[in-house]
Image (spheres, helix red, strand yellow):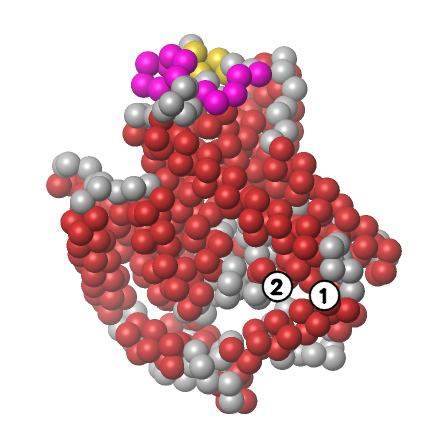
Amino acid sequence: MTGYPSITIIIVLLVGLFLAIRNPYRAFLLSVLVIGAGNAKELNLTRTTLLGPYLNLTDICLLVALFALLCECLLRRMPPRMPRILLFILIVLSIGALQSFAVFGWDYETLRSLRWAIQFPLAFFLAANFITNPHRVKLFITTLLVAAVLAAAQHFYYVIGIGQKIVLGSDSFAGIRTISYSSGGLAEIFLLSIMIWKLPKKISSKLFFIAIGSLFMLSVLMNQTRSVWFAMIFAIPIVAKIFQLRQRYDTFFRIGVIAVVSASLAILLCSFLIPDLDIAGMVNKRFSLLFDTSGAALATGGPTSGRLDAIRVEMTDWLDGTLVLGRGLNYFKNMQGKLLDIAFGHVGYVTYLSQLGIIGFFVYAIFLPLSVIRNCRRVWLSSQVPIVRYAVFLSASSMIYNCIMFTMSSCFLSLGSFVPGVLAGMAWAISRVRIVDKQPLQNRKNIAFTNKHEYAPLYRNE
């Protein structure tokens, strides 16, 4: 693909390299903004004439961020830090990749599966080294919020464009369905935070965040993904329990009020700009297909049959293969064209087992989420800096949301895991880096952020 995508890649590359030399952290934020705000599918399809399918806009952003980290380390005169959890992930992925290369060779599809799989640990690594003080945390959260707003606005504009071409009736709702603007659940976790987190005291600020929440709610409803809806609903009480929110009844009453207000404003906005789009009817139709396994339902988006078949096939292949190490990344490549109705990779935990075995399942499904949530809870209990507490709240919400969604759709081996990766890396950095005069302390463990930039034990009993 040439033309506009190539020009965009060149511009992002040049601007990113310039920022990496002048201000490495700004270059990192640029990469986060482009990936977070972009349409994941379209970013993945951008190509250059020179390198063909092996370089797209997302790859450029990752390369810019890596070069910025190199510049950052040279300026600090300190080597990058490698979190222990990433070592386990890289070992597991290396085993899975070697199995794929041994069976299928070094071709585009095996390289693509590895490229998608390393996106999460790479994002984790970048954030773990770039987040060094509360000011950077604030800039990072602001960048993510701007990215989420841009993605939701693009999603709305995308639906308006389709609505001008086709009649948006009950038979054409599937034509506007897309999760390409979801960015790893970025809009969803910000929406959760707006419902759960204490809103600002100023009325104008409250209205601003409720308006943003309505835009996010509209995007979440229009993507028509039930796994996203269920993940958001079930994540709310878990997040509230982990962070021990006081006045639970008041909290859940506020959550309900904000959710209803956001949904009402979203429907009102949609009815004004896209009068043919019946959101209530669209949501009802998606739920009506939930347990419908007929051929007609499958053709119009019914997921149950495809997921059940995926569980059956992938579990059978795992049991017939290497239980401990799995069968390798993208092992089901040899089934393409034979089992068209099977939703491979949709049930994340089964995919971990089939591709990476028991070891991979333990690392991705147990060790990783517990590690991230543990880091977030430590900081929550020890720090009084609002932006830091909000940051770990977002990180934990992201991990909880994705862990619930992976029971129904996707996993950290697929496209779109950059944002959860940087959020998890941010939590790791905050829980282990102590800032005094804006300089990171090295080789200090169990130290957290404080209001006055003083040393503070991470545990209350220390």
| Quadrant position of residue 395 | top left
Query: Image quadrant for the N terminus?
Result: bottom right
Query: Residue reaching furthest top?
Result: 437
Q: Nearer the viewer, residue 167 or 316?
A: 316
In the rendering, at what x and y percent does residue 327 appear?
76, 60
Farthest residue to the left: give it: 203
Q: Nearer the viewer, residue 114 or 404?
A: 404
Q: Residue at x 47, y 65 (%)?
A: 178
Callout 2 environment at 10 Å: few (<14), some (14 to 19), or many (20+)? many
Residue 350 disc label: 2
Residue 382 covered by magenta stretch: no
Residue 46 showing in the rendered view? no
- Residue drawn at point x = 52 percent, y = 39 percent: 371
Amino acid type of the residue tagged 2 in the rendering: Val
Provide the residue designation for mark 1: 318
Q: Amino acid at mark 1?
A: Trp
- As measured in the structure, the alpha-carbon distance from the residue carrying label 2 to the one carrying label 1 is 9 Å
Horizontal arrangement in the rendering, residue 265 relative to residue 112 (left or right) = left
The answer to whether 369 appears left or right of 239 in the picture is right
Tell me where the magenta segment starts and ends, as one range.
Answer: 443-456
**8 left or right, relative to 214:** right
User: With respect to residue 104, does 334 lie above or below?
Assistant: below
User: Which residue is drawn at the image coordinates 65% and 19% (left, top)?
Assistant: 79
Where disc 2 sits, the SS reads: helix
Residue at (46%, 38%) from the top-left corner? 374
Majority SS type along the magenta span: loop
Q: Earlier in the sequence, mark 2 or mark 1?
A: 1
Please check the rendered image and state whether residue 455 is part of the magenta-colored stretch, yes or no. yes
- Spot occupied by residue 399 in the image (x, y as percentages of width and height): 47, 47
Q: Pointer 2 and pointer 1: residues touching (CB < 8 Å)?
A: yes
The residue tagged with tag 1: helix, strand or loop? helix
Residue 353 in view (yes/no)? yes
